Image (spheres, helix red, strand yellow):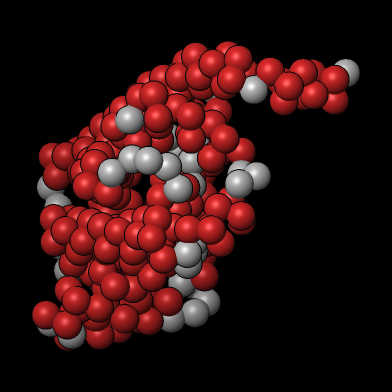
Amino acid sequence: MSQVSRAICWQLGALLIAIVLIAVLSQFFPIVDFVEALQGRVMSWGAWGAVCYPLLFAACNILLLPGGVLAVGGGFFFGVWWGLLVVFAGNLIGAAISFASSRWVARRWFQRKLSQNPTLRVLGPAVERESWKIILLSQLHPLFPTSLLNYLYGLTRIRFGTYMLWASIGRAPGLFLYVYVGTLGQLGLKLMRGRSQPRVIEYWTWGGAFVITVLLMLVLGRIAYRAIQASHATVMPESQADHPQASAEQGISST
């Protein structure tokens, strides 16, 4: 099994474990009541919810905190399309602030902290050569920390507008998957409360859309992984030719 497939399987496995854990705990604790009350509280914010939620999601990206839970919550609280819009807006805000911070605000500090990062050593020369293609593929790659990439790309020569465009396009499929999972959670809550009685065809529709989205992410992730590995293999000989002494020292140290 490739690294991409393994990463996606781990994420799906963690999701299934979380669902089973919630189902078990709900037999002993009023988890469903708490979740329903939380949903009502968020929905009662009205327009303020659409303002505060993206800012909260952006803060998680800026602070390098896991934002997957908030992305799922976007679908749970706001539905699939409004949830996607809210989470996408938060992603744009977080990416813009992180990129600008490493590019113009504290460039030397970030360069000192991230200079030894292996991701930067791979993507740095590749983005100089491939530009938007590497940005797009790295956002689709399930093994790359997307929040950290905002800071890493800020240290390269890529233009701000170019990065924001292709980074947003690359992250859209993953964000949609998280939001869609949250929408399924909203449906599950209604079923547990007996507020919805879907037909069999609706179950097939919801389940089929989820499976198709997962398969799409798997295919795109594998394509991104192979393309980045190919770009890395192409760039490495050039960088070694530019720095023969460093290459020789690396070869000596490896022996």
Q: Residue at x 33, y 30 (%)?
A: 131
Residue 207: x and y in percent read 26, 40
Q: Nearer the viewer, residue 193 or 236?
A: 236
- Taking the image as shown, residue 136 lies to the left or right of residue 67, namely left
Residue 200: x and y in percent read 16, 42
Q: Residue at x 13, y 61 (%)?
A: 82
Whether residue 165 appears in this view of the structure is: yes
- Check the image and name the residue furthest to the right: 255
Residue 31: x and y in percent read 43, 76
Query: In terms of image quadrants, where is residue 118?
Result: top right
Q: Nearer the viewer, residue 165 or 30?
A: 165
Q: Nearer the viewer, residue 87 or 153?
A: 153
Whether residue 139 appears in this view of the structure is: no
In the rendered image, the vertical position of residue 152 relative to residue 25, given as above or below: above
Q: Residue at x 73, y 22 (%)?
A: 245
Q: Quadrant of the N terminus?
A: top right
Q: How many marks?
A: 0
In the rendered image, the vertical position of residue 129 relative to residue 45, given as above or below: above
Residue 80: x and y in percent read 18, 55
Query: In terms of image quadrants, where is residue 81?
Result: bottom left
In the rendered image, the vertical position of residue 55 relative to residue 96, given as above or below: below
Q: Quadrant of the C terminus?
A: top right
- Taking the image as shown, residue 156 lies to the left or right of residue 215, namely right
